[in-house]
Image (spheres, rainbow, N blue to C red):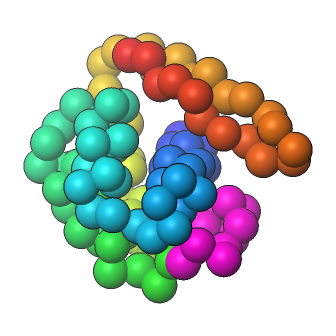
Amino acid sequence: MEIITASIVSGIIYDIFKTTGKLLLGSLRTKLQEFIIDDTIVEKLAKEISQMELNDEMSEKAITSKLEASTEILELLKQASSKTSKKVEITQINTNGDNVIKKIKL
């Protein structure tokens, strides 16, 4: 489950890079809060991700690989998925080869 969640988070990060050109901590927190219930986990996850060497030249797949390589990130995602009691519905749009998350619904 954490691997799937890592893919979702990487999509969020990729979208932030596409729209702003850089990873903004506030934007990341806001997006993570849309599908992670526990604010403590959101804060820890945002902090861990912001300390990673991610940039706007990375593909979504490269971002996913970096997230999956971090035991701290995977542990936080595991905690988040165990506390999520709601069904998560994700709407994705494929435009010009890019998968863009349009809506995350709880």
Residue 25 visible in the shown view: yes
Image side of residue 7 versus residue 104, left or right:
right
Residue 49 lies in what quarter of the image? bottom left
Q: Residue furthest front?
A: 20
Tell me, yes or no, whether the highlighted magenta stretch contains residue 59: yes
Q: Decide if residue 80 is in sight here.
A: no
* Residue located farthest toward the right when viewing the structure as drawn: 96
Q: Is residue 6 above or below residue 89?
A: below
Q: Is residue 86 left or right of residue 55?
A: left
Farthest-out residue, bottom? 53
5 above or below 28?
A: above
Q: Quadrant of residue 105?
A: top left
For the image, the number of numbered tags is 0
Whole-percent x, y for residue 11 in the image: 58, 49
Residue at left offset 81%, top offset 38%: 95
| Residue 76, x across and y down, in percent | 31, 55
Image coords of residue 90 (percent x, y): 57, 24
Bounds of the magenta span?
55-66
Residue sitting at x 53%, y 17%: 89
Counting from the top left corner in percent of width and height, residue 50 is at 33, 73
Q: Residue at x 47, y 60 (%)?
A: 20
Q: Residue drawn 53% across and 53% down?
A: 19
Q: Is residue 94 magenta?
A: no
Question: Considering depth in this image, is 84 or 42 the residue closer to the camera?
Answer: 42
- Which residue is nearer to you in this view: 94 or 86? 94
Q: Quadrant of the C terminus?
A: top left
